């Protein structure tokens, strides 16, 4: 029988809403006014959070006033600490990009424009909780006084004092003592690990929670979905942070599934309480993190939080975003700059001044420069002083087995022969 005429099938390929030479249409962000979104009960059933997964939790308005039910009403000293840590992170990033351009390190990744998500969440969590970060969560370390800048720079320069002995790419830090799980270059692997760690914490009868971090693009990885299912089924005490900075290298967030829906809505679909939050609003980040942490600690279940923010810099030192997006995009991003917004709030409160701001910057720049000089005494990529080759045999077994001892001796002999040949 002859079929009636049917349309030819075609696929939809999402496109960014702005390309170089044009200007981005940011209406897709679906913003809510500051203070407009109410706060659910800490034990709200996950399915009832669907509304919170589409609206946007915001506290700070455009004039720097804090509004609504999510205002955490933090003491001014805590706000100043947050501002200082965000400035420290931004200045450190800028200095390390410069060092990369001077060939002192091979590679660097900034978190320009995203400083609030890590620093406000770090304030809301407790010592002993474990973060499972990506390469863009250096703020979790830079906000701590017990992590020295020098130690971070030695890792970035892969020099003789690199705590990871050159085994990791620059930026892929590991700091157990700071609750900072080893960063993996393989995207999304940290998600099932974070949920597994949270489950183990509950199995052991502990009170520590996990915080997992992932970018918008990486949510397309199957590890992300596996992690959500486990988190939901066992109500694991974990916060799932999806940092939607609009880009995954040159792929717009729509290519990972953000078009016509939100990343927060994925959480609701799987059975997780979900919030969509202004990631450039320090107060909103603190309040939402505190809510999710209290929910996890009270055995009410995990929370997925989509942080809406913007990757203001290139993806890494190997990227040139002017090839795929308008160059002035960040300046036009409706949620602004997290540092400027918290500064404005403190100025409105009468708890900060322009002079204090400039002093703070000068002090931080001096500290970073001094730490860099100290770190460079142990070598940088320029002079090739790297951890000894011997170290590749270490830290695998508690006691080195005979076959590795033999191989190490062979390597040492070969290296010695090479040195003798060179000097002959
Ligand atoms: C499994 C895997 N696939 C691809 C890559 C290459 N890669 C590194 S970062 C990146 C983009 C990730 O974007 P997103 O998750 O949005 O995080 P963002 O860089 O924006 O913070 C890609 C594709 C990788 N490292 N691992
Ligand atoms: Mg991204």
Image: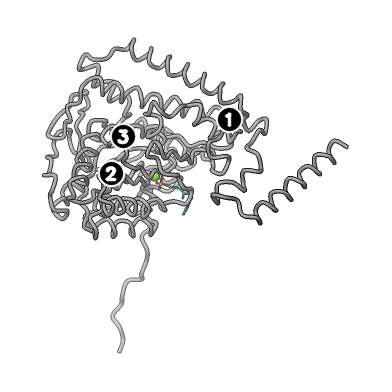
C-beta proximity under 8 Å, tags 3 and 2: no
**What is the distance, in whole Å, between disc 3 and disc 2 at their CAs?**
14 Å
**What is the distance, in whole Å, between disc 2 and disc 1 at their CAs?**
41 Å
- Whether disc 1's CB lies below 8 Å from ligand 1 is answered no
Q: Is residue 185 left or right of residue 305?
A: right
User: 248 or 374: nearer the eye?
Assistant: 374
User: 4 or 83: nearer the eye?
Assistant: 83
Q: Position of residue 341 (x, y in %)?
A: 28, 25
Disc tally is 3
Q: Position of residue 151 (x, y in %)?
A: 50, 30
Indicate the quadrant where residue 78 lies. top left
User: 322 or 249: nearer the eye?
Assistant: 249
Considering only order in the chain, which callout, 3 or 1, is on the residue closer to the N terminus? Answer: 1
Q: Which residue is mark 2?
A: 208
Mark 2: give few (<14), some (14-19) or many (20+) Cα within 10 Å: many
What's the residue at 46%, 27% (across, down)? Answer: 148
C-beta proximity under 8 Å, tags 2 and 1: no
Q: Position of residue 166 (x, y in %)?
A: 58, 40
What's the residue at 24%, 40% (across, down)? Answer: 277
Q: Is residue 122 left or right of residue 55?
A: right
Relative to 202, residue 156 above or below: above
Q: Which mark is residue 423?
A: none
C-beta proximity under 8 Å, tags 1 and 3: no
| Secondary structure category for the residue under label 2 | loop
Would residue 48 be visible to someone looking at this image? yes
Q: Which residue is mark 1?
A: 101
Considering only order in the chain, which callout, 2 or 3, is on the residue closer to the N terminus? Answer: 3
């Amino acid at each position: 029988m002859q079929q009636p005429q049917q349309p030819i099938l075609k696929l939809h390929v999402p496109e960014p809403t702005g390309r170089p030479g044009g200007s981005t249409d940011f209406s897709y962000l679906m913003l809510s006014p500051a203070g407009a979104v109410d706060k659910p009960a800490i034990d709200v059933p996950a399915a009832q959070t669907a509304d919170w997964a589409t609206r946007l939790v915001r506290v700070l308005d455009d004039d720097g006033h804090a509004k609504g039910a999510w205002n955490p009403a933090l003491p001014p000293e805590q706000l100043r600490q947050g501002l200082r840590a965000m400035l420290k992170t931004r200045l450190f990033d800028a200095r390390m990009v410069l060092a990369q351009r001077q060939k002192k390190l091979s590679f660097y990744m900034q978190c320009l424009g995203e400083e609030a998500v890590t620093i406000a969440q770090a304030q809301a969590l407790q010592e002993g909780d474990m973060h499972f970060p990506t390469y863009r969560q250096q703020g979790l370390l830079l906000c701590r006084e017990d992590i020295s800048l020098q130690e971070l720079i030695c890792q970035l320069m892969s020099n003789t004092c690199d705590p990871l002995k050159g085994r990791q790419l620059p930026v892929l830090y590991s700091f157990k003592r700071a609750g900072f799980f080893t960063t993996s270059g393989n995207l999304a692997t940290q998600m099932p690990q974070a949920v597994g760690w949270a489950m183990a914490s509950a199995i052991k009868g502990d009170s520590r929670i996990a915080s997992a971090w992932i970018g918008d693009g990486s949510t397309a990885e199957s590890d992300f979905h596996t992690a959500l299912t486990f988190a939901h089924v066992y109500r694991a005490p974990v916060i799932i942070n999806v940092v939607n900075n609009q880009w995954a290298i040159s792929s717009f967030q729509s290519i990972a599934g953000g078009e016509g829906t939100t990343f927060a809505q994925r959480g609701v679909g799987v059975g997780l309480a979900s919030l969509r939050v202004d990631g450039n609003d320090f107060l909103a980040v603190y309040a939402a993190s505190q809510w999710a942490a209290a929910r996890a600690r009270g055995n009410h279940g995990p929370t997925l939080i989509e942080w809406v923010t913007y990757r203001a810099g290139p993806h890494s030192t190997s990227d040139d975003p002017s090839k795929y997006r308008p160059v002035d995009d960040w300046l036009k991003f409706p949620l602004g700059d997290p540092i400027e917004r918290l500064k404005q709030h403190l100025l409105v409160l009468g708890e900060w001044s322009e002079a204090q701001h400039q002093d703070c910057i000068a002090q931080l720049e001096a500290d970073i420069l001094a730490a860099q000089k100290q770190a460079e005494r142990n070598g940088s990529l320029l002079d090739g002083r790297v951890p000894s080759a011997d170290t590749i045999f270490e830290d695998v077994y508690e006691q080195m087995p005979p076959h590795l001892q033999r191989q190490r001796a062979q390597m040492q002999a070969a290296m010695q022969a090479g040195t003798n040949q060179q000097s002959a």
